[in-house]
Image: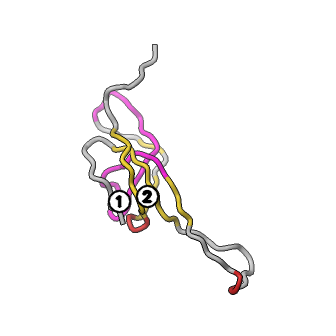
């Protein structure tokens, strides 16, 4: 099992492979014919450091303003650490823009 990545004050961008909880077929199911398959998911987002103990918390984005701290995030997802199979580190949030508009 992989644990939550070590992050700095910057919110790290990661790709996470994890196993989700899932339901079987709805309605009546023949026990002898049922074949459960794990639901393997892939999520990409910024790690919210220390958001919830025992979980890897990802957000899809945040508001960039004149303040140093991140105060507003979007699409929060909490993944139990016990369900995380792989974390790929993709980079960190930087205050320096990569591309600027005219």
In this view, the residue in front, 90 or 11, is 90
Residue located beneath label 2 in the image:
78
List x then y, in percent, for residue 50.
30, 55
Q: Is residue 64 left or right of residue 40?
A: left
Q: Which residues are magenta?
A: 43-68
Task: Give neighbour class at mark 2: few <14, some 14-19, many 20+ (Cα, 10 Å).
Answer: some
Disc 2 to disc 1, how far (Cα)? 8 Å
Q: Residue at x 36, y 25 (%)?
A: 97
List x then y, in percent, for residue 67.
30, 31
Label count reads 2
**Mark 2 residue element:** strand
Q: Is residue 8 magenta?
A: no
Q: Quadrant of the N terminus?
A: bottom left
Mark 2 in CB contact with mark 1 (< 8 angstroms): yes
**Mark 1 residue element:** loop
Q: Residue at x 50, y 54 (%)?
A: 42
List x then y, in percent, for residue 85.
42, 62
Q: Earlier in the sequence, mark 2 or mark 1?
A: 1
List x then y, in percent, for residue 34.
68, 80
Q: Is residue 23 left or right of residue 67?
A: right
Task: Give neighbour class at mark 1: few <14, some 14-19, many 20+ (Cα, 10 Å).
Answer: few
Q: Residue at x 34, y 37 (%)?
A: 93
Q: Quadrant for residue 52, please give it.
A: bottom left
In this view, the residue in front, 99 or 89, is 89
In the current view of this chain or complex, which residue is farthest to the left? 8
Residue located beneath label 1 in the image:
52
Q: Is residue 39 left or right of residue 57?
A: right
In the figure, 36 relative to 12: above or below?
A: below
Res. 92 mark: none
């Amino acid at each position: 099992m992989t644990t939550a990545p070590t992050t700095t004050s910057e919110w790290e961008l990661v790709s996470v492979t994890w196993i989700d909880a899932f339901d079987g077929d709805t309605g009546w199911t023949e026990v002898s014919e049922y074949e459960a398959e794990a639901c393997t998911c892939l999520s990409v987002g910024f790690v919210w450091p220390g958001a919830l103990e025992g979980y890897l918390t990802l957000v899809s984005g945040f508001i960039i303003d004149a303040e140093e701290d991140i105060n507003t995030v979007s699409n929060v997802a909490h993944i139990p650490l016990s369900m995380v199979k792989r974390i790929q580190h993709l980079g960190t949030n930087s205050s320096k823009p990569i591309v600027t508009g005219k």
